[in-house]
Image (tube, rainbow, N blue to C red):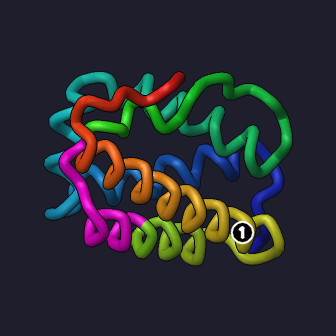
Amino acid sequence: MNDIQHIDDIKALVDGFYGKIRTDELLGPIFNHIIQDRWPEHLEKMVRFWQTVLLEEHTYFGAPFVPHAKLPVGKPHFEHWVQLFDATVDELFTGEKAERAKWQGRRMAEMFLIKIEYYQQNSSATPLV
């Protein structure tokens, strides 16, 4: 196995991970309900996000948290998300960027969870873009 090096590697990671998400008993219903028939657009956006993070090719511009702010999720969902993400990375890659991807995924999940819990407890608050 090789490390994450090219855009095709990012596409393989995104496609593999979200392939698992779509059929997952815990996360699939949430993602499928929100994304519906917009999976191609979502996958393209995730490729650009991870391309920016891991390859330092700045193709993603946006606020990744805002669409997630009001999701009906909690700690078990994020723990499971991290497990699936780490497993996908480990199945496909090994190396420094693969480890960075897992670290970044855990970091993002932790931050999203903290923010989502805040908005769940403060229903009148609105996330900033």
Q: Where is residue 75 in the image (x, y as percent from the top left)?
A: 30, 68
| Quarter holding residue 61 | top right
Q: Is residue 69 shown above or below 14?
A: above
Q: In this view, does 77 lie to the left or right of 14?
A: left
How many numbered discs, if any?
1
Q: What stretch is highlighted in magenta?
A: 71-81
Q: Is residue 94 shown above or below 41?
A: below
Under tag 1, what secondary structure? helix
Q: In this view, does 128 lie to the left or right of 101?
A: left
| Quarter holding residue 70 | top left
Q: Where is residue 83 in the image (x, y as percent from the top left)?
A: 42, 75
* Residue at left offset 23%, top offset 54%: 73
Predominant secondary structure in magenta? helix
* Residue at left offset 74%, top offset 67%: 100
Instruction: Look at mark 1 in the image and give the residue it sits on.
Output: 98
Q: Is residue 79 magenta?
A: yes
Q: What residue type is labelled 1?
A: Ala
